[in-house]
Image (cartoon, rainbow, N blue to C red):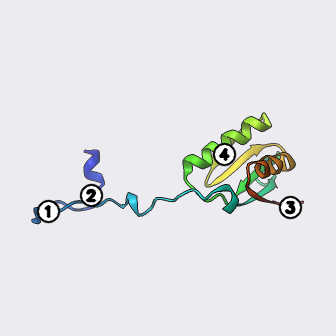
Amino acid sequence: MGKDKDKKGIVYSTNPDFKFASDESENTIETLPPQQQNLIVMLDKRNRSGKAVTLVTRFVGTEEDLNDLGKFLKTRCGVGGTVKEGEIMIQGDFRQKITQILLEKGYKVKISGM
């Protein structure tokens, strides 16, 4: 049944050589290498009951690579965090430490809001 959901309204074709092409190949986003990324690191306290969260934004790539980077940063900082809506959120003010870690990995990084 799950296979039928991918066909988006195509029920039958009279063409014996018909091959259904899915949209997955069109929407694949490749992860840019670290040298081409332009990441922004900032501190955010809005809508968080006054608690500070360090945000890493503008990552261009797959969700899996973003999750891997988020996990790496959380481990190196020794704190919790999450990856939501294309942003990495690290609990606490770790702007300097995260910037240093990302620069060591070869990313282009700017600190915003200092």
Task: Residue at 29%, 61% (x, y): give it.
Answer: 21
Give SS at disc 3.
loop
Query: The residue under label 2 is which amino acid type?
Result: Lys
Residue receiving disc 1: 17
The residue closer to the viewer here, 53 or 95, is: 95
Contact between labelled residues 3 and 4, with CB atoms less than 8 Å apart: no
Residue receiving disc 4: 69
Residue 17 drawn at (x, y percent)? 14, 62
Residue receiving disc 3: 113
Earlier in the chain: of badge 2 and badge 1, it is 2
Is residue 13 visible in the rendered structure shown here?
yes
Task: Residue at 75%, 44% (x, y): give it.
Answer: 90
Task: Residue at 74%, 48% (x, y): give it.
Answer: 105
Residue receiving disc 2: 7
Give SS at disc 2.
loop
Earlier in the chain: of badge 4 and badge 3, it is 4
Give SS at disc 4.
helix
The vertical placement of 2 against 7, above or below, is: above
Which of discs 2 and 4 lies nearer the camera? The answer is: 4
Earlier in the chain: of badge 1 and badge 3, it is 1
Query: The residue under label 4 is which amino acid type?
Result: Leu
Query: The residue under label 1 is which amino acid type?
Result: Asp
Earlier in the chain: of badge 2 and badge 3, it is 2
Alpha-carbon span between mark 1 and mark 4:
43 Å
- How busy is the neighbourhood of tag 2: few (under 14 within 10 Å), some, or many (20 plus)? few
User: Which quarter of the figure has residue 42?
Assistant: bottom right
User: Which quarter of the figure has residue 114?
Assistant: bottom right
Residue 45 drawn at (x, y percent)? 81, 52
Give SS at disc 1.
loop
The vertical placement of 13 against 53, above or below, is: below
The residue closer to the viewer here, 32 or 78, is: 32
